[in-house]
Amino acid sequence: MSPKTSTELSNMRQGGRILSDALAKVASLATPGTSLAELNRAAEKLIKKRGARPAFKGYKGYPYATCLSLNSEVVHGLPRQYRLQEGDLLGIDIGVLYNDLYVDSALTVGIGKISPENTRLLEVTYESLWKGIQLVKPGRQLGDVQATIQRYVEGAGFTIVRDLCGHGIGRSLQEEPQIPNFGKKGTGLSLKARYTFALEPMVSFASPHTATKPDGWTVVTLDGRNAAHFEHTVVVTRDGVEILTRRRGERSRIP
């Protein structure tokens, strides 16, 4: 991980605004009867209209602008002709490339009325992301952030998916270091101002491990139970953290 220049950060901020609007657009369209393919097209259209490129499309051969993951699919779900049904969970993961700088963000939404158990899964996963973000500042070690996410999730009775992790980001879509959502306090990289990375807790009801479907992309929980995924790209500031992909109306400040 290396510090970004002021110009690079400005481009990442603009990319973050485009990405957050694309996520909000897809989330608003994700209603019963809408197909995943339709959601993917809407995201790609918005991103291109704003002068950016879908970062995932073509990355390691991936053919779509978005990853749309259903229920037990943790990440990398393919936007197919499946039409959303009441009670589904949908993970929406989008990356944007703007002026050669990358940002990445994700959220999981319930389709129509979902069960209390699934509602709690979404709440805990989302809150764990914020628990991690609020610790980010110069001098903090990444292990502190990772351990905090893990402790919150496990304390709420859920499980961290251990086969997947966050990562550095900026000049490449995935930069070092890898950032698992579990760890030990007092360990890991010491953060510095202008470092940029993506935090992305992935949480399941029980199994910490995953498998990949025959399509070669879609990652599912090993036990077939539902999972949730939330992600933001952040930058370390001189005295704290800035969320580059925060959506309009999302929390106004870091606690």
Image: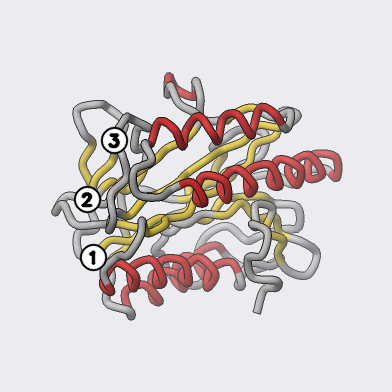
> Looking at the image, is 216 positioned above or below residue 34?
above
Q: Which mark is residue 1?
A: none
For the residues labelled 1 and 2, say whether their Cβ atoms are less than 8 Å apart: yes
- Tag 3 or tag 1, which sits nearer the N-term? 3
- Tag 2 or tag 3, which sits nearer the N-term? 3
Q: Which mark is residue 221?
A: 2
Please report the residue visible at 65 percent of the width from the left and 52 percent of the height from the top: 245
- Residue behind mark 3: 82
- Tag 2 or tag 1, which sits nearer the N-term? 1
Cα separation between marks 1 and 2: 9 Å
Please report the residue visible at 46 percent of the width from the left and 37 percent of the height from the top: 39
- Residue behind mark 1: 205
Please report the residue visible at 80 percent of the width from the left and 64 percent of the height from the top: 238
Please report the residue visible at 66 percent of the width from the left and 39 percent of the height from the top: 170
Locate residue 45, reporting x and y percent. Answer: 60, 29
> Looking at the image, is 130 positioned above or below residue 246?
below
* Amino acid at the residue labelled 2: Thr
Q: How is the image coloured?
A: secondary structure
User: In the picture, residue 95 is in which quadrant?
Assistant: top right
- Crowd tier of the residue under label 1, counting other residues whose Cα lies within 10 Å: few below 14, some 14–19, many 20 or above: many
